[in-house]
Each structure stands twice: as C-alpha cells, then as structure tokens.
Image (tube, helix red, strand yellow):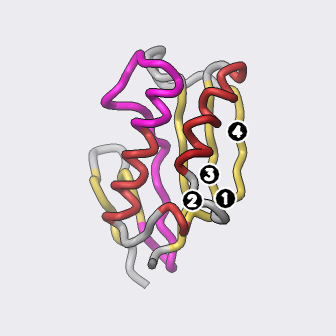
Amino acid sequence: MQIERYETGKRMSQAVTYGGFVFLAGQVAIDAPGASVREQTTNILARITRLLDGAGSNPTRIVSATIWLTDISSFEDMNAVWDAWVPSGHAPARATVEARLAGPEFTVEIGIIAAVGN
C-alpha cells in the first residue's frame, strides 16, 4: 500500500492517505483567525470538505472526529455549525475536549479520520 501526502510542508502534511483511510491534520481557521467560534467552525469545516475531496473522500465517509475548544462553554456554538454540516445519518464517532491551542487567535481545532471513496 502506498502512502500519499497532500499539502505537505516542512513539519506536516494536511492530509495523508493509507490503507483506505485519509487522516487530516488538526484544522484551524486559517482564513478566520480571531473570529467567533461559529465563524471559525464554518471556516474549518469548509477546509475539511476541500481536503477530503482532494483525497478522494467526503463528509459522509468520516469515521472519527476530535474537536478541541479553548473554552468548553462554546460547545453549543460549535455544535450549531457542526450539526448543520454533518450529513444526516452519517455522524462519526467524536470526542470534544477543552485545550489550549497553538495560538490565541484560534478557538477551535478539528481533526478527522475518514474512509477513502464515495
């Protein structure tokens, strides 16, 4: 089996496929730093959709998600966007935790594992 890397930089790749799965790096709102939790979540989910598409997958194929919030009290704001984005009947296994992120301008980070294919 071949490992394929997407959007590879010095330290990391944004996505890696192997063994029928795509593993996404934790995604932050690069295009919306400092924005509200809802706006950051929207930005992140758009990035995830784009990365999944590029790796031959889509949101219906997500098997696991990990979400980090800098303030767990923003859980409902993040969920409002998440719930509208997850295709009906395709909710993945998921964990959400409170954590300090790489920079104070980011309040949400999401990591995804999905099956490759449509």
The amino acid on which the numbered mark 1 sits, given as a three-letter code, is Ala
Write the residue at 45% across / 78% down: 117
The amino acid on which the numbered mark 3 sits, given as a three-letter code, is Ala
Which mark is on residue 96?
4
- Pick whichever of labels 4 and 3 is earlier in the sequence: 3
What SS does tag 1 mark?
loop
Query: How far is the residue under mark 2 from the one under mark 4?
Result: 19 Å
What SS does tag 2 mark?
loop
Q: Nearer the viewer, residue 81 or 3?
A: 81
Which mark is on residue 72?
none
Percent x, y for residue 118? 45, 78
- Rendered-image quadrant of the N terminus: bottom left
| Residue that badge 3 annotates | 65
- Pick whichever of labels 3 and 1 is earlier in the sequence: 3
| Residue that badge 2 annotates | 87
List the single residue furthest toward the bottom: 1
The amino acid on which the numbered mark 4 sits, given as a three-letter code, is Thr
The amino acid on which the numbered mark 2 sits, given as a three-letter code, is Pro
Q: 31 left or right of 89?
A: left
Write the residue at 64% across / 36% down: 79
| Residue that badge 1 annotates | 91
Write the residue at 65% across / 26% down: 99
Percent x, y for residue 39? 44, 27
Write the residue at 37% across / 51% down: 14
